[in-house]
Image (tube, rainbow, N blue to C red):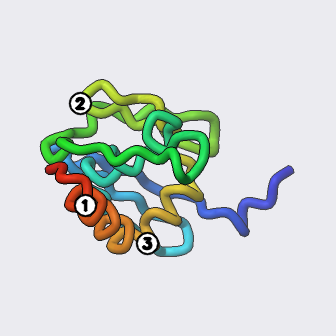
Amino acid sequence: MTDQTSEPWPTELRVAKDRRNLLVLFDDGSSYDFTAELLRVRSPSAEVQGHSPDQRVTVPGKKSVEISRLEPVGNYAVRIVFSDGHNTGLFSWSYLKELGEHKDERWAEYLDELSRQGLSR
């Protein structure tokens, strides 16, 4: 049996009424409020991340994306289905925890990538 005390474990996932945010509460007391846009552009899917860090894609034009639904995947992840049809990212609990802990940094990196590539949100 896996020792879950060392792994982050969500106690609640709550999609906002406007479908533009996801609140994730963890059993260690931490909580993260993610915009749908950040989750979409930092999706752990191969479509976004590629198969190596140098293949990661900057995804523009997702400012208005919404969360259509959440689908549980086993007991380790959630699939987020977005209003633009993207649904291939499996957001593991550890990925959500890491993304939450570095949310501001990841957002700044994304805005910088858009700027450097002449793209817009």
In terms of secondary structure, where does tag 2 sit? loop
Residue under pointer 1: 116
Q: Position of residue 11 (x, y in %)?
A: 49, 57
Residue under pointer 2: 83
Query: Is the Cβ of the residue at disc 3 closer than 8 Å to that at disc 1?
Result: no
Residue under pointer 3: 102
**Could you tell me the amino acid type at mark 2?**
Ser
Name the residue rendered at 24%, 56% in the picture: 114
Name the residue rendered at 25%, 49% in the picture: 37
Q: Earlier in the sequence, mark 2 or mark 3?
A: 2
Estimate the spatial distance between the alpha carbons at disc 2 and disc 3, rounded to whole Å: 25 Å
10 Å neighbourhood of mark 1: few (<14), some, or many (≥20)?
A: few
Estimate the spatial distance between the alpha carbons at disc 3 and disc 1, rounded to whole Å: 21 Å
Name the residue rendered at 47%, 47% in the picture: 56
Q: Earlier in the sequence, mark 3 or mark 1?
A: 3
**Could you tell me the amino acid type at mark 1?**
Arg
